[in-house]
Amino acid sequence: MARDTKLILCPVNLRHVKVEYNAYTEAVEMAQRRGAKLIVATVAPEIERNLNIYDSDKYWGDELKKFLAAHPAEGVEVETVVRKGAVHRQIVKLADERGVDLVVMEAANPKVQDYLLGTTASHVVTHAECSVYVVRT
């Protein structure tokens, strides 16, 4: 029997979103087909490199809202979340806290150093309690 998917998490890297948002598009389509709610999240660095960003939560929250305004999720209930910290850990933590059924995320093609150091996607696949759908860029 197929699993009932009611809550999908799609982490978005807003620094690369102008060219890479295939996972978001896929997550929206999945949410539409399954009648699921979509959490679109971004993870901000704990210490901003850009000294002009005084309120990281507000800045990245506004950027996430701009992204969603430019790429609306027709017919899907969407919630936004901004977290701070290590991206791979925050994605897994958010998925676990919210009882997410599915994580849909981007992953670049792996290189040799990715196998040695690990990637965000591989960490999430390994540590998340839910299913993870990885979209190659």
Image: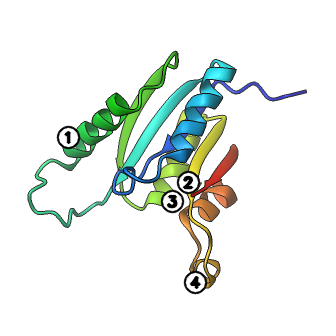
Q: Please report contact status of discs 1 and 4: CB closer than 8 Å, yes or no.
A: no
The front one of 83 and 9 is 9
Q: Are marks 1 and 3 in contact (CB under 8 Å)?
A: no
Of badges 2 and 3, the one in the foreground is 2
The x, y position of residue 113, in whole percent, is 58, 84
Which mark lies nearer to you, 2 or 1? Answer: 2
Residue 85, quarter of picture = bottom left
Q: Are marks 4 and 3 in contact (CB under 8 Å)?
A: no
> For the residue marked with disc 1, what is the amino acid?
Lys
> Disc 2 versus disc 1: distance between alpha carbons?
24 Å
Q: Indicate which disc, 2 or 3, sits on the residue closer to the N terminus.
A: 3
The numbered disc on residue 114 is: none
Circle 2 is placed at which residue position?
106
Q: Is residue 66 above or below residue 46?
A: above
- Marks 2 and 1, the one that precedes in the sequence: 1
Residue that sits furthest to the front in the current view: 19
Amino acid residing under circle 2: Glu
Q: Secondary structure at mark 1?
A: helix
* Residue type (three-letter) at the residue carrying disc 3: His
**Vertical side of 33 occupied by 10: above or below:** below
Query: Could you say whether the residue bearing mark 3 is in a helix, strand or loop?
Result: helix
